[in-house]
């Protein structure tokens, strides 16, 4: 399983919690719905950072 596939699965997990519907802009901002790619990228970066230092130690 490649990193792109893992990232897609992680984003899909965030997006299932709330789906964007075009034209429905009167709702409050949902971080899981609106920033799924950003959150997934941040989690992936943090994981790589931790693994890098765990291997380096």
Image (spheres, rainbow, N blue to C red):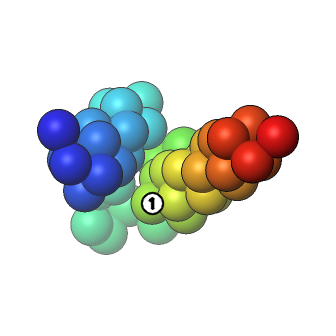
Return the residue nearer the eye: 6 or 53.
53
Residue 41 placement (x, y as % from top left): 52, 59
Q: Secondary structure at mark 1?
A: helix
Callout 1: 10 Å neighbours few (<14), some, many (20+)?
A: some
Tally of numbered tags: 1
Viewer can see residue 30: no
Please state the horizontal and vertical placement of residue 8, each as a whole percent of the image: 26, 49
Quarter holding the C terminus?
Answer: top right
Q: Residue at x 29, y 42 (%)?
A: 6
Name the one closer to the observer, 49 or 41: 49
Q: Is residue 9 above or below residue 22?
A: above
Return the residue at label 1.
37
Which percent across, then down, holds residue 22? 27, 66
Nearer-the-camera pick, 8 or 12? 8
Left or right: 53 as drawn, with respect to 15: right
Query: Would you identify the image quadrant in which residue 15 lies?
Result: top left
Q: Is there any visible trace of residue 25 in the rendered image?
A: yes
- The residue depicted at 30 percent of the width and 52 percent of the height is 3
Q: Which quadrant does the N terminus fall into?
A: top left
What residue is at 74 percent from the left and 37 percent from the top? 54
| Residue in the picture at 36% in, 32% down | 13
- Left or right, 45 with reference to 26: right
Horizontal and vertical percent position of residue 4? 25, 56
Residue nearest the observer in this picture, 41 or 20: 41
32 to 49, vertically: above or below: above
Q: Is residue 27 left or right of residue 57?
A: left
Which residue is most to the right?
A: 57
**Residue 1 to residue 20: above or below:** above
């Amino acid at each position: 399983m490649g990193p792109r596939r893992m990232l897609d699965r992680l984003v899909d997990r965030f997006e299932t919690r709330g789906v964007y519907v075009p034209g429905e802009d009167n709702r409050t901002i949902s971080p899981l719905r609106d920033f799924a790619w950003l959150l997934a990228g941040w989690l992936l970066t943090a994981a790589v950072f931790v693994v890098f230092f765990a291997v380096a130690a």
